[in-house]
Amino acid sequence: MGAYYRRAQTSKPRTWSLKTFHLRCYNPGPMTDADRQAKVQELRERVDEVDLELIRALSERAQIVQDLARIKFEAGVPIFDPRREEEILRRVVEQNPGPIYDSSMREIFELILHRIRDLEIQRGEFQR
């Protein structure tokens, strides 16, 4: 189970309502419309930066997997290792800090793993 889930199970019950949580964490004081618009723009720019980081990280991961697949293919070793995939997915859940649920994070990574692995198969370079 990820840290987020464990923390939710082991910590004392919170007495804050969602509204109180929102006000404490995201609303340090009254905001003008201009302040709110500026904050929205700032957060959107940060989302765009994170999206770019994700694109670069996924592309780098795909390149590494291509290199690994090529080496395995040349050595006559099976490209797909279900135990390794399960190990990766288990580690993803263990390292998940939240707020994304562990099950959702696992599904996201399953999709990433499958799409990158299938990239080579779609190109016809390697057999399963």
Image (cartoon, rainbow, N blue to C red):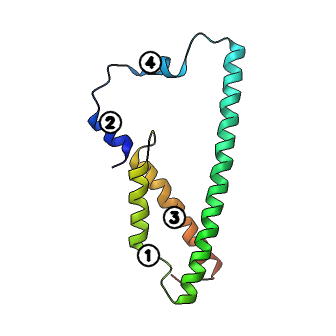
Residue of label 4: 19
Residue of label 3: 113
Element type at marker 3?
Answer: helix
Q: Tell me which label, 2 or 3, sits earlier in the chain.
A: 2
Q: CA distance from mark 3 to mark 1?
A: 11 Å
Residue of label 2: 8
The correct choice, above or below, for 25 with respect to 80 in the image is above
Residue 100: x and y, percent? 45, 42
**In which quarter of the view is residue 18 placed?**
top left
Around disc 1, counting alpha carbons within 10 Å, would you say few (fewer than 14), some (14 to 19), or many (20 or more)? Answer: few
**In which quarter of the view is residue 57 placed?**
bottom right
Q: CA distance from mark 2 to mark 1?
A: 33 Å
Q: Nearer the viewer, mark 2 or mark 3?
A: 2
Query: Do tag 2 and tag 3 residues touch (Cβ < 8 Å)?
Result: no
Residue 56: x and y, percent? 67, 55
Around disc 3, counting alpha carbons within 10 Å, would you say few (fewer than 14), some (14 to 19), or many (20 or more)? Answer: some
